[in-house]
Image: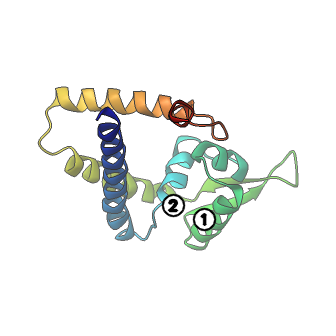
Amino acid sequence: MAKAGKKDTLARLQSTARLARTALASRLLSHGFYAGQDQIMMALDRENGQTPGQLASRLGVRPPTITKTINRLQAQGVLEKRSSESDARQSHIFLTETGAQAIRAIEKSVRKTEKLALKGLDKKDVKALSKLLSKIEANLSELEVDGPDEDDAEES
């Protein structure tokens, strides 16, 4: 019985994350951005001039994915690539002035989506939810990708 509850919880967590991302994607699209592009923009807003490899690592995606997205954002005029002064093989990614201005629209989209998602929850509930999600995130961050599931071992 307990296992069914855990499965229901994970399914609900996945569904909620998908719905939140869909709602945010809709808002971002109205500003000319696709889902995922906002993450690169925000990462550069926090620390401008990162390499594509640094961005990929920080966002947990593969370098080819980052490269493709950077190229699209560069074509939109919100990012620019500059060669490294110390290593010509390396490039660094910077927000353009247009990109820096777009950050405000991205932040506003995130705030509106969060407000919608948390509608009806009081501050205590939001704080508790945030704490629980942090714990879940920490638990999943410790997961060994190639290791066997403990539950599978127990069921054998």
Counting from the top left corner in percent of width and height, residue 15 is at 33, 54
* Nearest the eye: 145 or 34: 145
User: Residues under labels 2 and 1: Cα distance?
Assistant: 7 Å
> What amino acid does circle 1 point to?
Thr
Neighbourhood count class around disc 2 (C-alpha, 10 Å): few under 14, some 14–19, many 20 upward: some
- The residue that label 1 is drawn on is 69
Q: Residue furthest front?
A: 156
> Is 142 positioned to the left or the right of 22 in the image?
right
Do the CB atoms of the residues marked 2 and 1 lie less than 8 Å apart? yes
Q: Where 132 falls versus 105 (above or below)?
A: above
Counting from the top left corner in percent of width and height, residue 3 is at 35, 36
> What amino acid does circle 2 point to?
Gln
Neighbourhood count class around disc 1 (C-alpha, 10 Å): few under 14, some 14–19, many 20 upward: some
The N terminus: image quadrant:
top left
Secondary structure of residue under mark 2:
helix
Q: Residue at x 59, y 41 (%)?
A: 47
Q: Where 39 falls versus 130 (above or below)?
A: below
Q: Quadrant of residue 149?
A: top right
The C terminus: image quadrant:
top right
Query: Which is nearer the N-term, disc 2 or disc 1?
Result: 2
Counting from the top left corner in percent of width and height, residue 76 is at 55, 72
* Nearest the eye: 99 or 17: 17
- The residue that label 2 is drawn on is 37
> Is 85 positioned to the left or the right of 104 in the image?
right
Q: Residue furthest bottom?
A: 75
